[in-house]
Image (cartoon, helix red, strand yellow):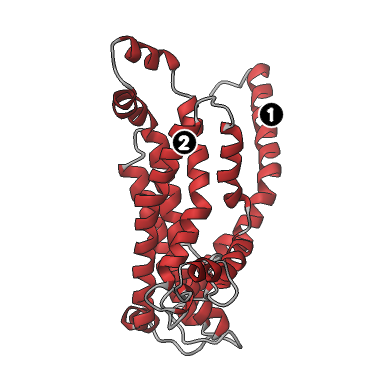
Amino acid sequence: MANRTPAARRLSVIQKTDMLNALAFVAPALIMFSAFVVIPMIEAGYYSFFNWDGFGAPIDFVGLGNFVEAFQTPAFKIAVVNICWAVAASLLIQIPLGLGMALLLANKLQGAVYFRLIFFLPYVLAEVATGLIFSFVFDGDYGLLKPIFEMAGQPAPYPLAEPGQAIFGILFVVVWKYFGFHMMLLIAGLQSIDKSLLEAATIDGANRWQITRYIVVPLLMPVVKLCIFFAVLGAVQLFDLIMPLTGGGPLDSTQTLVTYLYTNGITRTRIGYGSAIGVVLFLICVAFSFSYKKWILRDE
């Protein structure tokens, strides 16, 4: 084989130097990601096969026993149902509400910027702070509900203390907090639409409803799909709002998979069982993410 020319050798040296520089910048992030994400995930999968309390070495191997116990436990089933409720509220109320507000506030109307700020502020507020605020709002003794019901001559309810009502109080808070996030995404999508398309439709005689229905909404579908992706993953991982509101109670009626994992894996020191719940949660998130990317976002 012929010897390489000096130019080819210089190019090879430059390529090697660039690769070493890239590795030097990537290595710290890769080490951190491996130490705090990859390795704990592998360990959680390993611990899920043991009946382990976190002390000493895991030696009580139970195989799939933790997974079988989880799927047979009523609280786990309630957690899965509550996730379905959260997903339904996000898709049927939260995103449509965000879309409606985006359509109203996307135009440069007087005061529209202030309304955007008002509706976006709940998303900026920390989840724990939001939960603490609404724990007082829903308090039938000292909260906002008491004077409202007293003016109507009715006793104030305790929605967070009723097993059949608590989850709907939490869903109300979820919609209130996160619809502003979707609203801002959709406003950004609306502002990227070519205005000449809307002007052409107006010249052709289309009214505002027809323009919205046949032009604006179809062009917004990529953003809507992104909102659905965020909403579903957020509902599956719902945790921060629930802990200050109900802590998963009363009677486990507001548990989600993450609060159920925390209650059993951390509070009750059932690390093996909690790891099994974490594996189930991980598989749900990964399955949804990859399938959604493949079948829904494949053209984006």
Residues at marks 2 and 1 touching, judged by CB atoms closer than 8 Å = no
Q: Residue at x 65, y 36 (%)?
A: 19
Question: Residue 91: x percent and y percent?
Answer: 36, 50
Is label 2 or label 1 in front?
Answer: 2
Is 142 situated left or right of 157 in this image? right
Mark 1 neighbour class, 10 Å CA radius: few under 14, some 14 to 19, many 20 or more: few
Q: Is residue 197 left or right of residue 263?
A: left
The picture quadrant where one finds residue 166 is bottom left
Answer left or right for 83 relative to 135. Answer: left
Q: Is residue 155 above or below residue 170?
A: below
Disc 1, SS: helix
Residue 185: give its label.
none
Three-letter amino acid code at disc 2? Answer: Ala
Instruction: Provide residue 159's location: percent of width, then percent of height.
Output: 45, 73
Q: Is residue 296 above or below residue 52?
A: above
Neighbours of disc 2 within 10 Å: few (<14), some (14-19), many (20+): many
Residue 2 in picture, x, y percent from top left:
56, 20
Circle 1 residue:
13
Asked if residue 219 can be seen in this view, the reply is yes
Q: Residue at x 34, y 63 (%)?
A: 84
Q: Is residue 46 in view?
A: no
Q: Going from the N terminus, do you reach mark 2 or mark 1 first?
A: 1
* Tag 2 secondary structure: helix
Q: Is residue 287 above or below residue 156?
A: above
- The quarter in which the C terminus is drawn is top left
* Amino acid on which the number 1 mark rests in the picture: Val
Which residue is more in the foreground, 136 or 39? 136
Alpha carbon distance from label 2 to label 1: 53 Å
Residue with the mark numbered 2: 102
> As rendered, which of 146 and 178 lies closer to the eye?
146
Q: Nearer the viewer, residue 81 or 47?
A: 81
* Image quarter of residue 68: bottom left
